[in-house]
Image (cartoon, rainbow, N blue to C red):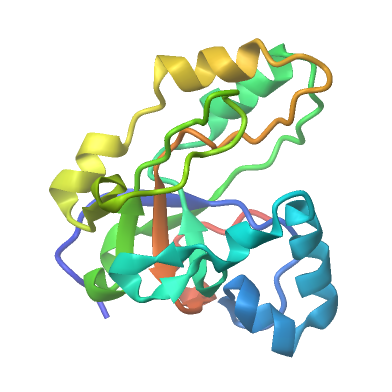
Amino acid sequence: MTHTITGILYHRPASAVRGNAILPLNCLRDLHPDLYELHTAKHAAAPAVLDQVVAPLGCSWGDVVFFSPVHPRPLLAALRHSGRTVPEQEPWVLPAGRLDPDRTVIRLMRAGAAGHHADPPDADDYLPFTTASLRAVNRVTVQAVRRLRTLQPDDPWLPWVDVPHVLYRGPVPLTWFDGRPT
């Protein structure tokens, strides 16, 4: 199905994909428990984030697939500048019009006081999934690049903490992607 939303979204799978869809974390729990354990380990310091409510979609953080409205190249280059080893990997490319706007929302991310974790959302942190909203958030900010370039060796290196997220409730078929580098 194609919708009238225009724009490009990016996705970098954190592990090998099994099956014919990108699955939200909560789907992995039942279908691929080993992948579920692998991905939930990243949230060991703050497991409550997985239960965080995504109010506009009527679900939790663990029920959505995450996309970026910005190409990750400048973020990853900034990480490399700070001394981090980041593999060269092109993101998967998804035409935004393939996502159902009723199952999709844009979440603005605000870096917390320490700059390493996102503040909890409020109602103003959610934008409707429209072409205009995507155009408003499809640039990497100077602040995001500066934060990543100046990370100290012991700082967490969450590249997406202050980059808007596009959240889609449910699985995303692999056939929806135009580009899937291996």
Percent across and percent down for residue 117 are: 59, 36
Q: In this figure, what is the number of numbered marks? A: 0
When asked about the image quadrant of residue 141, the answer is top left
Question: x%, y% of residue 61?
Answer: 52, 65
> Quadrant where the C terminus lies?
bottom right
**48, 67: nearer the viewer:** 48
Q: Is residue 87 above or below residue 19?
A: above
31, above or below 151, in the image: below
Image quadrant where residue 1 sits:
bottom left
Position of 58 with respect to 67 (left or right) is left
What residue occupies the far bottom of the structure in this picture? Answer: 30
> Residue at horizontal 52%, vertical 31%?
112
Q: Is residue 99 visible?
A: no
Residue 57 location, x and y as percent? Answer: 33, 72
Left or right: where 33 falls relative to 112: right
Q: Is residue 70 in view from this perspective?
A: yes
